[in-house]
């Protein structure tokens, strides 16, 4: 088998959804590892080590990523950091964005901050 192409994924989520995110990542990892053609590298802020400048690490990871997985919830949609930094950077760099709703959300009651035209996965 030849060398797999590396794909870097940035996972954006609200910390209030930590348990849901861990569950998603556990299940998602199995699918990614089974890929024949690609070597997926997931990055989320749990990769930041003590003493590192957290914002620099997040912004660097966003810039290096090939696409963003947005784990959307009401807490996600009201996170100032996600709304002011992460989503605009992903959009401005033309990255592929895959919004995943962590649970059913009535989107007509929320500002989706530019994501309303994208297909959400549930």
Image (cartoon, rainbow, N blue to C red):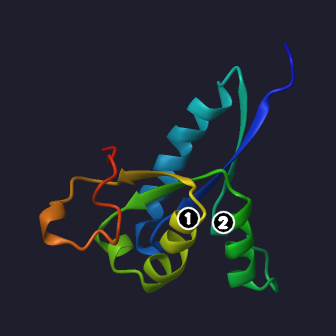
Which of discs 1 and 2 lies nearer the camera? The answer is: 1
What secondary structure is found at the residue carrying circle 1? helix
Q: Residue at x 81, y 83 (%)?
A: 52
Q: How many marks?
A: 2
Q: Which residue is mark 2?
A: 62
Judge from the rendering whether residue 103 lies leftward or rightward of residue 94; answer left or right.
Answer: left
Judge from the rendering whether residue 57 lies leftward or rightward of residue 81; answer left or right.
Answer: right
**Residue 41 in the image, given as x and y percentages of width and height:** 72, 46
How many residues crowd mark 2 within 10 Å: few (<14), some (14–19), many (20+)? many
* Quadrant (top left/top right/bottom left/bottom right) for the N terminus: top right
Q: Which residue is mark 1?
A: 90
How many residues crowd mark 1 within 10 Å: few (<14), some (14–19), many (20+)? some
Q: Residue at x 67, y 31 (%)?
A: 33
User: Compared to 44, does 8 lie above or below?
Assistant: above
Q: Earlier in the sequence, mark 1 or mark 2?
A: 2
- Label pair 1/2, CB-CB below 8 angstroms: yes
Near-viewer residue (85 or 102): 85
User: Compared to 70, does 76 lie above or below?
Assistant: below
What secondary structure is found at the residue carrying circle 2? helix
């Amino acid at each position: 088998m030849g060398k797999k192409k590396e794909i870097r994924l940035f996972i954006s989520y609200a910390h209030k959804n930590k348990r849901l995110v861990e569950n998603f990542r556990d299940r998602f990892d199995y699918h990614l590892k089974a890929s024949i053609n690609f070597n997926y590298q997931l990055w989320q802020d749990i990769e930041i080590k003590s003493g590192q400048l957290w914002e620099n690490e997040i912004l660097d990871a966003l810039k290096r990523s090939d696409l963003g997985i947005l784990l959307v919830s009401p807490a996600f949609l009201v996170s100032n950091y996600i709304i002011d930094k992460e989503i605009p950077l992903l959009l401005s760099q033309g990255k592929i964005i895959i919004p995943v709703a962590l649970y059913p959300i009535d989107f007509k009651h929320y500002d989706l901050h530019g994501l309303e035209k994208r297909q959400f996965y549930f």
